[in-house]
Image (cartoon, rainbow, N blue to C red):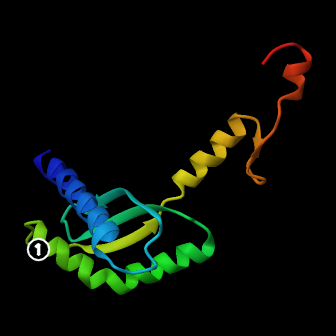
Amino acid sequence: MALHSRDRRVAGQIQELLASVISHELNDPRVPKIFTITDVTVAKDLRSARVYYSQLPDDEKALARTEGLIADSMGYLRGRIAEDINLRVTPELHFSYDPSAKNYQRINTLLHGGNPDAGESATPEKSKRKGRL
């Protein structure tokens, strides 16, 4: 159980560090306007870490720019982890886009009567005719 809690602690430290480094230290125009590290999972041996991120804008072009940024910055990011987190081996980083924010926005639009493809809210005409809001 101690190993499991260490995994979670290390994953949390990596998440906080990467979020800060990408948002504040990388002086690259490819950094998205809104970038969030949504989760980090580490292997039991702490040799690899899966980093999940979300961003806005999240169209294909913006995601491709971010992938390029991550690929170009991988050495720097691993170096910062090695400097700031006391580990025997610096984990190999694997980044994955997390579409949960986009899915949340789409579900929220659907629940509120909107068309998720048009990005607009529909007017609930039936409710108005019956005298309800």
Measuring from the top left, give residue 33's x and y in whole percent: 47, 65
Determine if residue 89 is in view. no
For residue 83, which quarter of the picture? bottom left
Determine if residue 80 is in view. yes
Using residue 100 as the reference point, say whether residue 10 is left or right of it. left
Q: Quadrant of the N terminus?
A: top left
- Most distant residue in the right direction: 129
Which amino acid does the dot numbered 1 rest on? Glu
The secondary element bearing badge 1 is classed as helix
Q: Is residue 125 above or below residue 50?
A: above
Q: Is residue 93 above or below residue 122?
A: below
Using residue 54 as the reference point, say whether residue 87 is left or right of it. left
For residue 69, which quarter of the picture? bottom left
Measuring from the top left, give residue 66's x and y in whole percent: 47, 76
For residue 62, which quarter of the picture? bottom right
Q: Nearer the viewer, residue 119 or 84?
A: 119
What residue sits 73% from the left and 51% below the top? 119
What residue sits 92% from the left and 19% below the top? 129
What residue sits 39% from the left and 83% below the top? 71
Measuring from the top left, give residue 53's x and y in whole percent: 42, 62
Using residue 98 as the reference point, say whether residue 111 is left or right of it. right
Q: Is residue 34 above or below residue 47?
A: above
Q: Nearer the viewer, residue 57 or 49?
A: 57
